[in-house]
Amino acid sequence: MPGSFKLATWNVNSLNVRLAQVLDWLAEHEPDVLALQETKVPDDRFPLAELQAAGYHVAYSGQRAYNGVAILTREVTSDVSVGIPGFEDEQRRVIGATVRGVRIACLYVPNGQVVGSDKFEYKLGWLHAAREFLRAELAVHERLAVVGDFNIAPAERDVHDPRRWEGKVLFSDVERAAFAGLLDLGLSDAFRLFEQPAKVFSWWPYGKVGFPRNLGLRIDHVLVSSTLAGECRECRVDTRPRAHERPSDHAPVIAQFELQG
DNA sequence: ATGGCACGCCCTGCGTGA
């Protein structure tokens, strides 16, 4: 399916709270794909009609209060999958779908809370399972995009103050090694395919100073297989929604491709 | 400067996020 292809990912921190912002954003940017994380809505309360009215097909897997992922597409999808095969997980963090010959894997990687905690061990085990899953996906999909909230800042330039975050959750060595392990499968960080300004982040703490002083981290990513990397023309963070009233604490990441078919 | 927000929950302070 050759032609231009715009793919975006956004942790919305409650789809119901952010629905109007998501609809506005879709109307403005008209992405072919928008992957969402932290929808925080069970499937029987998913705002399907509103998104369909905006012209999108939707695959979703959610739960009450926490987690939840979805993939919105302008064209119909095939092969929707939920979760990681063989990895038992009650938390809804993974959904996949194929559109226009591109396989999309939408991930909401666990936060980890505190290095060394039970939740941190869960994060590492989850990342290990995700790596094996993505290895298998790469073997069967020439065009694979792994997108979402990875809850890992890959490098010092992805952290506003690396010294203060050194060894902390989201920027510990073991998490960064797990992220590097994903790249080692043959994936590229689409954002780093291009020259970028300094201090570009995708998440900032809530509060009066976090976003205004750009005290953020780049933890939301678009990882692409080698074929897609060759077709990628741009990758950027759209910081504007972070300045809205009642914003998500994350901003969307957008990648533009020219699919060669 | 997440001590100092914001989410859901279903009641109000708690668990969780990042």
Image (tube, coloured by chain):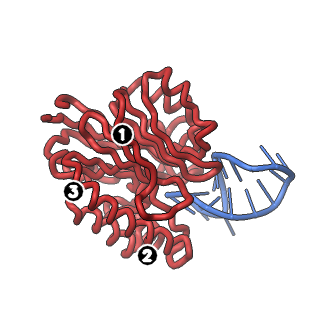
Chain colours: A red, B blue
Q: Position of residue A80 (x, y in %)?
A: 40, 42
Disc 1 sits on a residue from what chain? A
Q: Which of marks 3 and 2 is in front?
A: 3
- Residue at 56% x, 39% y is A15
Q: Which mark is residue A245?
A: none
User: Which residue is disc 3 drawn over?
Assistant: A139
Above or below residue A237? Residue A75 is: above
Q: Which of marks 1 and 2 is nearer the N terminus?
A: 1
* Mark 1 vs mark 2, CA separation in Å: 30 Å
* Mark 3 vs mark 2, CA separation in Å: 34 Å
Disc 2 sits on a residue from what chain? A
Q: Which amino acid does label 1 sit on?
A: Ala
Q: What residue type is labelled 3?
A: Ala
Disc 3 sits on a residue from what chain? A
Assign a secondary structure to mark 3: helix
10 Å crowding of disc 2: few (<14), some (14-19), many (20+): some
* Mark 1 vs mark 3, CA separation in Å: 23 Å
Assign a secondary structure to mark 1: strand
User: Which residue is disc 2 drawn over?
Assistant: A167
User: Which residue is disc 1 drawn over?
Assistant: A8
Q: Decide if residue A10 is on the left or right side of residue B1.
A: left
Q: In which quarter of the image is the N terminus of chain A?
A: top left
